[in-house]
Amino acid sequence: MTRPAPLLLLLAGLLFFVALGNHELQGSTEARVAGIAMAMHLDNDWVVPRLFGEPFLEKPPLSLWLDAGAIRLFGASTGAVRLASAFAGLFSVMLLYAMLRRFGRPKPLAFCAALMLATMASYWSNVRGVGEDALLSLGVTLALLAFYQATRPEAQHTSNMGSWLLFSAGMAIATLSKGVLGLAMPGIVIFAYLAGTSLLDKRVRPGQWLRPGVFTLVALVPLCIWLVFLYQRGGMQAVGEVLWTNSVGRFSGSFVEAGHYEPIYYYLAKLPEAFLPWNILVYLGLWHFRKRLASNRYLLFFSLWLVAQFTLLTFASSKRTVYLMSLTPAAAVLATEYGAVLLGRLSERLRRRLIAGVFTLVIACYLGAAIWYAPKADRRESFVPLTNQVQALQAQGHTVVLYQPNERVAGATVFYTMRNLPILQSPAQLRAYLDAKPGNVALLDRIEELPTPVTPLQKITVGSRPYYFVEQ
């Protein structure tokens, strides 16, 4: 294992797959996405994702297709629905190493950059969870690295069709994962880079601007095919919900129900933790290389990748730290390049030992967290006690329904019970249901707001939220 590529594959595999399924669904995103994937598997409906039995069209369904397929192949386990994210992370790490080598960077530097990406805390935690952000990051990474390979000065006199096809593949993955955001995240970087190089060269090359547009249109074909099927099922309202309400509406803030609205300085406040444990190297590297950007297109590209995407996300109304995941490959490259500057005066032997020691310590900490810490969080975050109680009541002959459920409990109950529980939305429906037959039970989380009194059977707390089983 002295060769960098096999060693990197081994280490990334350990980081992303060891103990992947040894803890239950935790948090709102995992419960919601796993529940929608389970519903897709149970209903055999691969066009319209559903939650609460209703269409759930926040984003295109690539991650849901992969998660539902994993459930069908490997069963309803937490490890199965996390596989798509884990493989997306593994592919991204190996892709970064391979492309940096294509860019002419030394093997040790490419290896360290890829391993820094794999060991960024936010990146590591998200590729080990259920969701679409790891796939978005893979698509953005593939598209941008392929774009740079196709347009960098050293490759101008060679055939770049393979790079442009990889660019289209990356854009297809990004748009099938996050819709319009999958266009915007690489698009803002490409625009900034082409504008910057045109200003530096004092020359506009129309071909450099047209080719990304043409191959982006090619990349949109898979998304358009799905939208056609969605239009046949739900009309323009369903298509508009995907492309406008949940994309433009989230960015502008007009889609109030989406939540996650934060002040414009939100990501600035998150910078101290954004790229742990390599934060200092990232920010010092960005500052250190600022005077070399005009003469070094490689550093210019990765600096603009970081800054342009950060600026775009800053001006979006809906903000979450997970959205910074697509910036992490650029951050890893800048951190590694600056680390090479810092360690340049050390002997090669001492440099290797220092790097090996730091990475060994970091990887050991992550593996410890995966094996021991994550399962301990089940005590307060797991939905299993809640769904076990649902199944126990059903086994005793009770009918159990959900009353005004939030997304996390609706998703968790579908995933763990492998069935869609009936849902009641109004106090009148709840009263009629409880009065209809003795033994009818409702699961809800706001007992104080009910207009008429009920009898609590049991209270179970998940995270900081209490849930109640009630009857007449």
Image: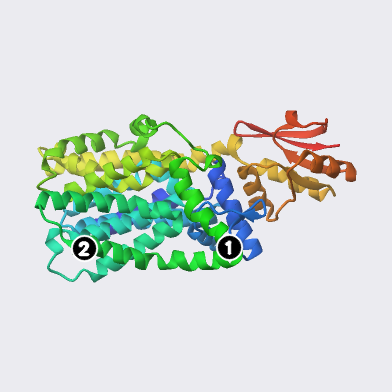
Mark 2, Cα crowd under 10 Å, few <14 / some 14-19 / many 20+, is many
Q: Residue at x 43, y 43 (%)?
A: 251
Q: Secondary structure at mark 2?
A: helix
Which residue is the site of mark 2?
150
Colouring? rainbow
* Of residues 455 and 417, the one drawn nearer to the viewer in this rendering: 455
Left or right: where 117 falls relative to 346: right
In the rendered structure, which amino acid carries the disc numbered 2?
Ala
Which residue is the site of mark 1?
235
Q: Nearer the viewer, mark 1 or mark 2?
A: 1
For the residues labelled 1 and 2, the Cα–Cα distance comes to 39 Å
* Of residues 6 and 316, the one drawn nearer to the viewer in this rendering: 316
Q: Position of residue 380 (x, y in %)?
A: 60, 34
Left or right: where 233 falls relative to 212: right
Q: Position of residue 176 (x, y in %)?
A: 45, 60
In the figure, residue 163 lies in which quadrant? bottom left
In the rendered structure, which amino acid carries the disc numbered 1?
Gly
